[in-house]
Image: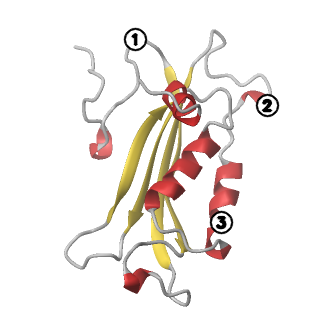
Amino acid sequence: MTKEAGAPLSGGMAGLWDVQRSHLRVIVRDLVVETRVGLHPWEQHPEKPTRLVVNIEMFAPVGPGGLQAESTSSIIDYDHIRDALKAWPTRPHTPLLETLLDEVVGLCFDNLRVDACRVSILKPDIFGEAAAAGVEVYMRREDWAAARNGSSG
């Protein structure tokens, strides 16, 4: 029996890659950062930034050479993404999480090997009755590029 695309994997996350192709999934999980974000008046106090939890998955096809990296230039490096997120505490107030989400997606696609990514940004402290609230996107490079060029579909 084969696993269908979208079928749950461990940890309750859905498998979103093409089951007909082999992929490498590079993960940054539960990166915690503070920044000033939110629409509500109580989120707009510069002295009280919002704690965010960021999860990133980058999907890249596995080439004919398999998983063996021929050089450091052929790996999917997540250091530049981590470095960018570490700078978020100094950024100006951002009203929407979607703005931050789009920024992280763009950082994922800085690596030309990445053909899709999944990014979530959660506010774990926003509601007392919920573990977190936030946004998540699964984005293919071609869809992201089309959105940048103002086309759809």
Q: Nearer the viewer, residue 35 or 8?
A: 35
Task: Give the residue type that dot 3 points to.
Answer: Lys
Residue depicted at 53% across the width and 24% down the height = 142
* Crowd class of label 2 (few under 14; some 14 to 19; many from 20; radius 10 Å): few
The residue carrying mark 2 is 73
Q: Quadrant of the N terminus?
A: top left
**In this picture, residue 135 sits left or right of residue 107:** left
Q: Nearer the viewer, mark 3 or mark 1?
A: 3
List x then y, in percent, for residue 143.
49, 28
Q: CA distance from mark 3 to mark 1?
A: 36 Å
The residue identified by callout 3 is 86
Determine which quarter of the picture holds residue 46: bottom right
Residue linked to disc 1: 20
Residue 75: quadrant of the picture: top right
User: Is residue 118 found left or right of 64 in the rendered image?
Assistant: left
Height in image: 69 above or below 45?
above
For the C terminus, the image quarter is top left
Sooner in the amino-acid sequence: mark 3 or mark 2: 2
Above or below 62: residue 109: below
Q: Percent x, y for residue 56?
A: 50, 47
Which color scheme does this rendered protein use?
secondary structure
- Callout 1 amino acid: Gln
Secondary structure of the residue carrying tag 2 is: helix
Rendered residue at 34%/31% (across/down): 15
N-terminal of the pair, mark 3 or mark 1, is 1
Residue drawn at point x = 36 percent, y = 29 percent: 16
